[in-house]
C-alpha cells in the first residue's frame, strides 16, 4: 500500500504545467499528520510506503521529521519517500534522510533547455542553475535517487538529449510523465516517435554495457508483454493500492484528485478521523474498471496506459475513458519498445534477460545498489 | 487525433516470462559479468540458483520430479549404508519443496511453520492412530555434515556443520522417534563461517535428508523426519498481503499433514504398528 501525505499546497516554484497551482496555500497540521499515521498504522500496518508530497513538501521539513518520528513509535513496517523540486535540499536534511531511510526523488525535466522551459520561480526566473548543485548533493547522499521528468510538446526536441544528460549526471532511474494536457499536434507526435527511437538506442547501449538504467516508459511496456497477465499488478487499481491524504485529512483515491485539497471534495472517499467510505471507494473503482467500447477491441488494450484512472479523469472527465492523445502516444511507444526487446533478446543481452525475466531481479538490483 | 483501435497486431518476437520458468537453466547461463565481479550480488545470485526461480513452484511436474529424486537418493543410501535390519527409518515424504529465501524485497517470500504449530499437527494426526509421543524424552543425535545452503560462493568458507538435534517426540511402545526440521533446526546445518548476504536461504528438505541419512546409519530407534514445506506468498497475484500470507501458511500446514499421513501408511506397511 502507498499513502501520500499532501503536506502543503504551497510551493517555492510556479511551473506552468502544474496541475495544482498554489493559489490557496494550505498546510497540514502536526495533529492531522499524526492522525494520518494513526490511520495508516490501524489500516495498513504492513509494508506501507508513506510518501510526503506537496506543493513542495520540503517547505515542511520539520513536519516530515516529526511525522516519521511519530510513525516509528507505531507497530507496523513503513518506508518513506519524498518528492521534491530539490531547491530546499541541503546536507543536513539528506543526512537525516539517509538515517531514517527516506528516499528522495527529485523533479528535473532534463537539460537546461528542457528544464527551464516550464520549471520557474513565481517571478519567471528559471530554476535550472540553482538546481545543479542540489542534484550533485542528492546524488552524493543517494546515488540511486530517482529523477522525475515531465516532457511537454514544447520540450520534446530535447527529450533524448535530456535523458542522456540525466544519465551523464549520474541518475540511473528516470521516471517520465508526458504532459498530456499540453498542446499536442501531429508534429509533436512525429517528434515523440523520433525521440523514442533515439532513446531506444541509448537504452540498448547502456543495457549492452551492463549499466544500470531504468527508464520508466520502456520498462513498463516491456513488462506489459513479458509479464502478461501479471502486468495487471503494475497498473492502476484506484484507491485499492494507494490513497492520498489532503492537508485537512480528507482521503482521495489518487494524488491528482487532491488538487488544492478543497475544490474537489466530490472525489473524496473519506476522512482520517472517521474511516474510508467503502461504498464510494468501490463505486469509483467499478467506474474506473468499466470497459471502454473502443479499447476492448484494441490489441494493445492489455498493455495500454488506459488503466490510469486519474489520467483519464484529468483528460476526458471520465475515469475509464482514455483520451485521444494518450491513445496516440501509446500506439507510438509499444512498437518501438517491442523492437528494442526483440533486438536485445536476439543479441542475448545478459542484463536484459536478468532484468526482465528473473523474478528476483529487484532484490539483486537493490543489493547491487547497496554495494 | 482520434481514438482508434489497433487490430491484428503481430505478437512481439521476444518471449514472455513463462519461457524462462519452463527453462530455468537459460537464466543461469546468462549472468552479467558485472554481477559476477560484485561479491554481494554473486553470493545472492548463488543462493537464488541454489533455491531455484520462485515461479518454478508453479510447475505441475515439480512434485513428481522431487519424489523421483528422493527415491533415487534413498536407494543409493541403502546400498552404501550398513543395514540395520531391526531398525527402520522412514524415507522423506516429499510434500512441499522445503526451500525459500527471506530478506530484502523478496518477490515470493516464504512462510514458515513454527515448531509449536508443527508439533500440534503431527501429534494430533498420530494420536488419531492411537500413537502418543513423549516430547521430552526424544533421543539426541549428534553428527557432522557438510554445511548446506551457505550463502557464500567461496568454497573455502564452506565447512562441516556440527549438528546436534534432540528429536521432537519418542514413543517407547513402538521404539519410534520423529523430528520436524524447522527453519530454526535448519540453521544447525549451516557452517559457522561468516559471510554477508541480504538474502537468507533455507532448505529444510535438504536438512531433513541429511538427518535421515544419519539416522539410517546410526539410529537406535525407528525414526521419521518431517520438514517445513515452506510455501510462498504469491505477491503478484494478490491484493491482500495478510490474506495471501494466511493462505500460504494453510498450504504449508496441509503439506505437513500429508507428510504425516504418508508416514502413518508407511508404519502400517512396515508392520511397526498393526494395520
Image (tube, coloured by chain):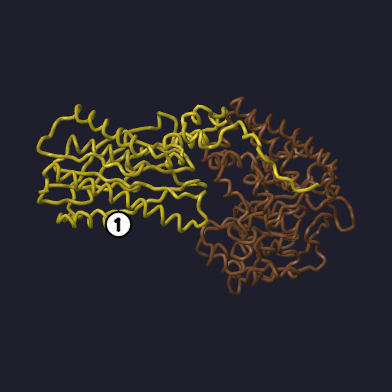
Chain colours: A brown, B yellow
| Quarter placement of the C terminus of chain A | top right
Q: Residue at x 45, y 41 (%)?
A: B54
From this viewpoint, is residue A79 visible? yes
Give how far across and how far down residue A278 sits, in percent.
57, 69
Percent x, y of residue B259: 27, 47
Q: Nearer the viewer, residue B215 or A193?
A: A193
Label 1: which secondary element: helix
Give above or below for B92 relative to A256.
above
Q: Residue at x 47, y 40 (%)?
A: B197
Horizontal arrangement in the rendering, residue A144 relative to residue B106 (left or right): right
Chain letter behind tag 1: B
Question: Is B11 on the left or on the right of B78, as rendered?
Answer: right
Q: Quadrant of residue A3?
A: bottom right
Name the image quarter holding the N terminus of chain A: bottom right
Which residue was labeled with disc 1? Answer: B116
Task: Give percent across and percent down for residue A325.
Answer: 77, 48
Pick the residue in front: B8 or A334.
B8
Residue depicted at 89% across the width and 54% down the height: A124
Count of marks placed on residues: 1
In this rendering, the answer to whether A28 lies above or below A288 is below
Residue placed at 27% from the left, 35% from the top? B144
Res A207 quadrant in image: top right
Mark 1 crowd level (few <14, some 14–19, many ≥20, 10 Å Cα): few
Q: Position of residue A180 (x, y in %)?
A: 78, 50
The correct choice, above or below, for B82 with respect to A181 in the image is above
Q: Is residue A142 visible?
A: no
Check the image and report above or below for A104 versus A351: below
Amino acid at each position: 500500500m502507498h499513502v501520500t501525505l499532501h503536506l502543503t499546497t504551497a510551493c517555492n516554484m510556479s511551473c506552468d504545467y502544474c496541475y495544482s497551482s498554489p493559489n490557496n496555500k494550505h498546510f497540514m497540521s502536526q495533529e492531522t499528520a499524526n492522525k494520518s499515521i494513526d490511520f495508516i498504522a490501524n489500516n495498513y500496518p504492513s509494508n506501507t510506503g508513506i510518501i510526503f508530497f506537496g506543493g513542495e513538501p520540503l517547505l515542511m521539513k520539520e513536519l516530515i521529521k516529526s511525522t516519521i518520528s511519530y510513525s516509528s513509535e507505531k507497530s507496523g513496517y513503513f518506508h518513506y519517500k519524498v518528492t521534491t523540486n530539490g531547491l530546499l535540499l541541503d546536507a543536513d536534511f539528506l543526512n537525516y534522510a539517509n538515517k531514517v531511510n527516506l528516499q528522495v526523488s527529485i523533479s528535473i525535466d532534463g537539460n537546461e533547455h528542457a528544464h527551464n522551459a516550464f520549471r520557474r520561480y513565481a517571478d519567471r526566473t528559471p530554476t535550472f542553475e540553482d538546481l545543479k548543485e542540489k542534484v550533485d548533493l542528492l546524488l552524493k547522499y543517494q546515488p540511486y535517487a530517482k529523477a522525475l521528468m515531465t516532457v511537454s510538446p514544447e520540450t520534446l526536441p530535447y527529450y533524448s538529449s535530456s535523458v542522456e544528460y540525466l544519465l551523464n549526471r549520474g541518475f540511473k532511474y528516470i521516471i517520465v510523465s508526458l504532459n498530456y494536457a499540453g498542446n499536442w499536434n501531429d508534429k509533436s507526435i512525429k517528434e515523440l516517435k523520433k525521440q523514442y527511437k533515439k532513446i531506444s538506442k541509448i537504452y540498448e547501449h547502456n543495457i549492452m554495457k551492463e549499466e544500470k538504467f531504468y527508464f520508466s516508459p520502456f520498462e513498463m511496456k516491456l513488462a506489459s508483454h513479458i509479464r502478461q497477465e501479471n502486468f495487471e499488478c503494475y497498473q492502476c487499481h484506484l484507491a485499492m493500492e494507494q490513497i492520498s491524504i489532503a492537508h485537512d485529512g480528507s482521503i482521495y483515491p489518487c494524488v491528482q484528485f487532491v488538487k488544492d485539497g478543497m475544490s474537489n471534495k466530490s472525489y473524496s472517499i473519506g476522512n482520517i478521523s472517521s474511516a474510508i467510505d467503502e461504498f464510494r471507494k468501490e463505486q469509483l473503482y467499478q467506474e474506473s474498471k468499466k470497459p471502454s467500447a473502443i479499447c476492448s477491441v484494441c490489441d494493445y488494450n492489455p498493455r495500454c496506459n488506459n488503466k490510469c484512472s486519474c489520467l483519464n479523469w484529468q483528460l476526458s472527465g471520465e475515469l475509464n475513458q482514455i483520451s485521444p492523445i494518450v491513445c496516440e502516444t501509446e500506439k507510438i511507444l509499444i512498437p518501438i519498445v517491442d523492437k528494442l526487446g526483440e533486438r536485445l533478446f536476439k543479441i542475448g543481452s545478459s542484463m536484459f534477460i536478468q532484468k526482465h525475466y528473473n523474478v528476483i531481479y529487484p532484490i539483486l538490483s537493490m543489493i547491487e545498489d547497496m554495494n | 487525433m482520434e481514438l482508434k483501435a489497433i487490430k491484428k497486431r503481430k505478437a512481439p518476437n521476444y518471449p514472455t516470462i513463462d519461457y524462462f520458468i519452463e527453462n530455468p537453466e537459460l537464466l543461469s547461463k546468462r549472468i552479467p559479468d558485472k554481477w559476477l565481479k560484485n561479491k554481494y550480488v554473486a553470493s545472492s545470485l548463488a543462493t537464488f540458483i541454489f533455491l531455484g526461480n520462485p515461479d518454478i513452484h508453479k510447475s505441475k511436474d515439480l512434485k513428481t520430479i522431487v519424489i523421483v529424486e528422493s527415491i533415487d537418493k534413498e536407494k543409493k543410501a541403502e546400498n552404501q549404508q550398513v543395514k540395520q535390519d531391526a531398525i527402520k527409518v522412514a524415507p522423506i515424504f516429499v510434500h512441499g519443496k522445503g526451500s525459500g529465501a527471506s530478506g530484502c524485497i523478496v518477490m515470493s517470500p516464504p512462510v514458515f511453520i513454527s515448531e509449536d504449530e508443527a508439533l500440534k499437527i503431527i501429534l494430533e494426526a498420530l494420536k488419531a492412530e492411537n500413537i502418543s509421543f513423549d516430547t521430552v524424552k526424544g533421543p539426541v543425535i549428534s553428527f557432522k555434515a557438510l554445511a548446506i545452503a551457505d550463502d557464500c560462493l567461496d568454497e573455502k568458507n564452506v565447512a562441516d556443520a556440527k549438528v546436534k538435534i534432540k528429536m521432537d517426540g519418542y514413543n517407547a511402545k513402538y521404539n519410534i522417534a520423529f523430528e520436524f526440521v524447522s527453519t530454526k533446526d535448519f540453521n544447525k546445518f549451516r557452517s559457522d563461517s561468516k559471510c554477508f548476504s541480504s538474502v537468507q536461504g533455507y532448505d529444510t528438505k535438504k536438512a531433513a535428508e541429511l538427518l535421515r541419512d544419519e539416522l539410517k546409519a546410526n539410529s537406535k530407534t525407528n525414526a521419521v523426519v518431517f520438514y517445513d514445506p515452506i510455501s510462498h506468498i504469491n505477491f503478484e497475484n494478490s491484493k491482500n498481503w495478510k490474506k495471501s500470507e494466511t493462505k500460504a501458511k494453510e498450504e504449508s500446514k496441509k503439506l505437513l499433514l500429508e507428510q504425516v499421513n504418508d508416514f502413518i501408511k508407511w508404519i502400517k506397511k512396515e508392520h511397526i504398528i498393526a494395520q
